[in-house]
């Protein structure tokens, strides 16, 4: 599959470390057949050197179209990792050039690559020479401002990247303030490849309102525990609380198939904020779920909520 061939608007689940593992990707895919899925944020050094990290290459065939997001700074290691991705039957790689984490940037990964366009381009060229995968990039407006955005992304396009996603904040902003999409619209006028917007997108309808001249959008933080956010509310009704509980439990059991139960219970807490929201006494119920230390207790409390709930619908 080529990015140029994907139906517009292109709608994607943004790559998020600790969130977009195969369990959650399968849940999103079940509800959204056309959404493009991305893996967790994954180290190329880890893929090449660690059997544990290589487990992130595992996916269910239902997840296609599915892409692997990679971070690092060594072009040769990127090429080796991309070849591993290709050998697993994954459709393409997305290079992270936007993560603002202090640890990541200190290692010259993520957003640090915005300050070294030469190395950024070499990474793309090495991957393209090593395999036949589609290569995309997710980055930001710039380091402190967006004055260099068009030049940077034009260089990436010349190096062979086939799609670019821009998060509407600079490195220095991290996740503060509102995302600024205006420079992304201007960038699209200068490139021939697909350009996607990212940052503060609440749901499908919100993405359409922000779309402008772009080819699509990614939903990140607002998709955590909310796989319904990709649905067109003009065509699909809002999920009921019963729907949310059923899907949450299915998601939890998928996570348990990947990790020990104790770890699955702890990790699932990050999804509860969206699964269990918008109904009477929701905060207290979430607190009760957060107290669970084992799967039996968690499942029992979820079923208790199902039995006691009002027959009401909640926002998607």
Image: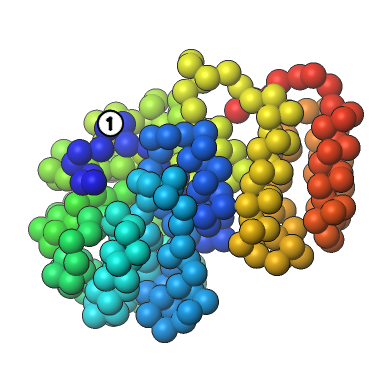
User: Based on the displayed image, in which of its 4 quarters is residue 85 positioned?
Assistant: bottom left
Drawn side of residue 313 relative to residue 96, left or right: right
Q: Residue at x 82, y 50 (%)?
A: 298
As drawn, 51 above or below 56:
below
Q: Looking at this rendering, what residue extends furthest in the left direction?
A: 158
- 10 Å crowding of disc 1: few (<14), some (14-19), many (20+): few
Q: Nearer the viewer, residue 39 or 181?
A: 39
Residue at the farthest bottom position: 49
Q: Residue at x 42, y 34 (%)?
A: 33
Residue 246 visible, this orientation: yes
Q: Residue at x 83, y 60 (%)?
A: 294
Residue 116 versus residue 1: which sits nearer the camera?
1
Say if 310 sits above or below 28 in the image.
above
Q: Nearer the viewer, residue 120 or 187?
A: 120
Residue most toward the top?
234
Q: What is the basis of the colouring in this image?
A: rainbow
At which x and y percent is residue 141? 32, 52
Q: Is residue 110 left or right of residue 284?
A: left
Please determine whether, in this image, residue 280 is positioned above or below residue 182.
above
Question: How far across and how far down the image is residue 136, in percent?
Answer: 26, 55
Name the residue tied to disc 1. Answer: 8
Place of residue 309 in the rendered image (x, y in percent of width and height, measured from the top left):
84, 27
For the C terminus, the image quarter is top right
Quarter of the view holding residue 148: bottom left
Q: Is residue 172 visible?
A: no
Q: Within the image, what quadrant is residue 75 found in? A: bottom left
Secondary structure beneath disc 1? loop
In-front residue for pair 201/314: 314
Q: Name the residue rendered at 33%, 57% in the picture.
A: 90
């Amino acid at each position: 599959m080529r990015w140029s061939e994907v139906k517009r608007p292109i709608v994607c689940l943004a790559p998020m470390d600790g969130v977009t593992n195969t369990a959650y990707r399968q849940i999103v895919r079940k509800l959204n057949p056309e959404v493009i899925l991305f893996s967790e944020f994954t180290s190329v050094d880890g893929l090449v050197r660690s059997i544990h990290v290589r487990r992130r290459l595992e996916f269910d065939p239902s997840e296609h179209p599915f892409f692997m997001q990679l971070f690092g700074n060594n072009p040769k290691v990127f090429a080796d990792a991309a070849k591993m991705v290709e050998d697993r039957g994954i459709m393409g790689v997305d290079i992270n050039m936007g993560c603002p984490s202090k640890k990541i940037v200190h290692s010259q990964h993520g957003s640090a690559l915005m300050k070294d366009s030469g190395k950024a381009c070499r990474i793309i060229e090495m991957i393209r020479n090593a395999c036949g995968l589609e290569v995309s990039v997710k980055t930001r407006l710039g380091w402190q401002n967006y004055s260099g955005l068009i030049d940077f992304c034009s260089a990436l396009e010349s190096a062979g990247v086939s799609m670019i996603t821009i998060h509407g904040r600079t490195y220095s902003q991290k996740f503060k303030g509102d995302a600024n999409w205006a420079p992304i619209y201007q960038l699209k006028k200068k490139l021939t490849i697909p350009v996607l917007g990212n940052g503060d997108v609440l749901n499908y309808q919100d993405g359409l309102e922000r779309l402008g001249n772009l080819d699509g959008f990614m939903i990140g933080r607002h998709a955590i525990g909310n796989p319904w956010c990709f649905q067109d509310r003009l065509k699909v009704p809002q999920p009921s609380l019963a729907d949310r509980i059923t899907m949450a439990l299915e998601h939890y059991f998928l996570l348990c198939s990947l990790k020990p139960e104790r770890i699955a219970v702890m990790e699932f807490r990050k999804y509860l904020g969206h699964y269990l929201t918008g109904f009477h006494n929701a905060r207290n119920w979430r607190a009760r779920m957060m107290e669970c230390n084992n799967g039996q207790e968690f499942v029992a409390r979820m079923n208790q909520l199902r039995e006691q709930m009002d027959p009401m619908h909640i926002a998607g």
